[in-house]
Image (cartoon, rainbow, N blue to C red):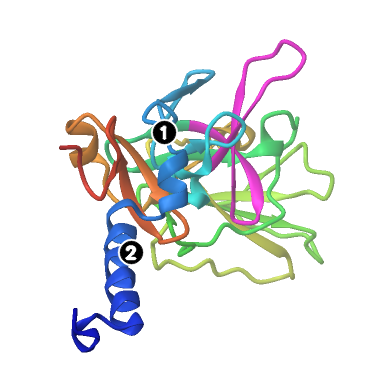
Amino acid sequence: MNPRILPSHKVIFTVFFFFFWILCLVVGSPVLAATIGSGDCQPQRCGNHTIKYPFWLSNKQPSYCGVSPFNVTCISSGGQAETLSLNVFDGLYHVKNIFYENKSVQLNAAGFDDDRCPLPTFNITSGLYPFDLSSANKRIFFLSNCSSPMNLSAFQNISCAADGGLAYFGGEYNGSGKLNFSGGVCKLFVVPVVGYIDVGIDVNYSALLRTGWLLNWTAPDCTVCSDSGGQCGFNDTTSKFMCICPDRVHLRKCG
C-alpha cells in the first residue's frame, strides 16, 4: 500500500475527537452515562410531599436527578412528621407545598414553625435565579427598634415583640406603593406572604408568617421526557437537560 495515502496521525485524531464530541452531546458525559440507572430518579416521598424533577432529595437520590439549586432535604427527628427543607436566599426554609403544574413552591423560614413569636430579621428580595417571588404574594411591613414612639393607625402592635414591633399588611408584593411615616427612625423589614389569605384588621401575623410565601421557578421542562416513559435529569457538567431511559440517556425523550 502506498504510504502516502495512509491517513496521518493528525487526521485520525481529528476524526476520533469529532465522534467523541458527538457522543458527549448525545449522552452528556460518557462516565456519567455509564453510572446512571433508569430507576435512580423515581419520585420520592417526604411527609406529604412528592419529590421529583427539578427537585431532588439529597439524602436519597443522585444529584443528576434534579437541578442543583433544587436540592431538598428530608428530616425526621424524635418521631415527629418528616420536614422537607430547601436552602435558598442564603438560609434554610421549610417547604409547605410544591405546585408542579404552575412551577411554584410555598416556603416559610425554618425558625417560624417553632417560634412563639416569629418576627423577620431579614428582607426577602426578588430576582434570585432560578427562583423568583410570585406576584401572587402580598407583603407585610415590620417596624422594630423605633427610636421614639410611633403613631401609625394602619400598623398593628405586635404584643409578643420585646421591642414593641409594628406590622402592616401592605397589598401586592410587587406594588409600587411606599410607606410614608415620620416621628422616628425604625428598622424596616418587608416579607412576602401567600396572597390568598383573607386578612382582616386584627390579623394574626405570627400565623401569617408561618403560612409562608410563594416562589416561582425556572427549569428545563420535563413533560416530553416523562410522557415518553423516561425520568428527567440534569447534567451539571454540561449544564444540559437529559432524559434517563431504560436503554440509555437521551437528550429530550426516550425512543
Question: Residue 169 location in percent, x, y?
Answer: 51, 48
Classified by dominant secondary structure, the portion drawn in magenta counts as strand
Residue 66: % across, % down:
44, 43
Q: Which residue is mark 1?
A: 98
Badge 2 crowding class, 10 Å Cα cut-off, few under 14, some 14 to 19, many 20 or more, is few
Residue farthest to the front, as pictured: 1
Q: Amino acid at mark 1?
A: Ile
For the residues bearing labels 1 and 2, Cβ distance under 8 angstroms? no
Q: Quadrant of the N terminus?
A: bottom left
> How many neighbours does mark 1 have within 10 angstroms: few (below 14), some (14-19), or many (20 or more)?
some
**x, y percent for residue 203:** 55, 34
Q: Earlier in the sequence, mark 1 or mark 2?
A: 2
Quadrant of the image containing the C terminus: top left
Front label number (1 vs 2):
2
198 over 4 or under it: above or below: above
On screen, residue 191 versus residue 250, left or right, reads right
Query: Residue at the spot x=59%, y=56% of the render?
Result: 89
Location of residue 180 by image quarter? bottom right
Separation (CA) of disc 1 from disc 2: 39 Å
Q: Which residues are magenta?
A: 71-96
Q: Magenta stretch containing residue 84, yes or no?
A: yes
The one nearer the camera, 50 or 188, is 50
Relative horizontal placement of residue 121, taking residue 50 as reference (left or right)? right
| Marker disc for residue 20 | 2
Q: Is residue 194 in view from this perspective?
A: no
